[in-house]
Image (cartoon, rainbow, N blue to C red):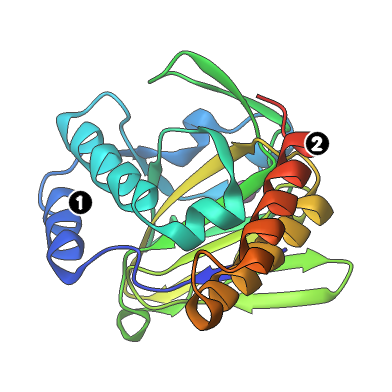
Amino acid sequence: MLLHLTNILSSDELEQAKSLLGGDAPWRDGRSSAGGQALAQKQNHQLSQDSEAARQLQALVLAALNRDPLFLSAALPKKIFNPLFNRYHGESNFYGPHIDGAVLHSKATQQWVRTDISCTLFLSDPADYDGGELVIRDAQGTQRIKLPAGHLILYPGTTVHQVTPVTRGERIASFFWIESLVRSDEQRRLLFDMDEHLGRLRQTLGEAHASVVGLTGTYHNLLRLWADT
Ligand code: NI
């Protein structure tokens, strides 16, 4: 499932993120973290994970994710890879078609994370750069994605994707992966749809209505059936 979540970061948080990522932020060649197939395809910069800026930015993004009910309902996160940050501009301006590794090791948390869901949180205003679209190919076709600053796209880790060359300005984003409690994209989608509809029913009928109580039970029983903790 491809899901666009709006306003994950407030405008204050966005300003804070931009100031941590500007000036003398410790950007490194992004190829240092790419293996095999990705190595030849990747031309960008990544923020050094060991920096104080990275630690503050990770905390900021994680706090924003953990307070967003739509994100939690859609991703059902078991583990979130510590958010990373990349920049495309100048000569280092693209990431060709590739697939993300299935299981990645986080240096920050010393955890292995299965990449059920890939996420990009856009941090640059789309008017400030040309190109830099996230292109995702799946069974439904090709999606070209370029979102306002502070917005997030969730997409299945199984897809081939790329970032097209940035030909003007710079594109800064946060990217990370989620190992979900529910491994199957199809099952997650069903739970997300059900949770959305239940939310509307709660508003119309009230929390105590017998059907709301019953269907909430069904939601949790499906989650219990499918969740792997
Ligand atoms: Ni990727």
Mark 2: which amino acid? Leu
Residue 104: x, y in percent?
A: 61, 26
Q: Secondary structure at mark 1?
A: helix
106, 66: nearer the viewer = 66
In the image, 155: left or right of 171? right
Left or right, residue 197 beside residue 89? right
**Pointer 1 local density, CA inside 10 Å: few below 14, some 14–19, many at least 20:** many
Quadrant where the N terminus is found in the figure: bottom right
* Outermost residue toward the right in this view: 139
Q: How many marks?
A: 2
The residue that mark 2 highlights is: 225
Which labelled disc corresponds to residue 21?
1
- Asked whether, in this view, residue 134 is left or right of residue 51, the answer is right
For image coordinates 40% across by 69% down, the residue present is: 151
Quick check: is the Cβ at mark 2 less than 8 Å away from ligand 1? no
**The residue tagged with tag 2: helix, strand or loop?**
helix
Quadrant of residue 15 in the image?
bottom left
Q: Nearer the viewer, residue 87 or 70?
A: 70
Task: Look at the numbered discs 1 and 2 and tell me whether their residues touch, using CB distance below 8 Å.
Answer: no
- Residue 165: image location, x then y, percent: 53, 69
**Residue 59 pos. (x, y %):** 25, 38
Around disc 2, counting alpha carbons within 10 Å, would you say few (fewer than 14), some (14 to 19), or many (20 or more)? few
Q: Quadrant of the C terminus?
A: top right
Instruction: For marks 1 and 2, give the CA distance.
Output: 42 Å
The percent position of residue 152, horizontal first and vertical second, equals 46, 64
Name which residue lies at 74% across and 60% down. Answer: 189
Residue at the limit of the structure toward the top, as seen here: 110
Residue type pointed to by label 1 = Leu
Q: Give the residue at x 50% y 65%.
A: 207
Image vertical order of residue 204 relative to residue 15, above or below: below
Q: Nearer the viewer, mark 1 or mark 2?
A: 2
The first of marks 1 and 2 along the sequence is 1
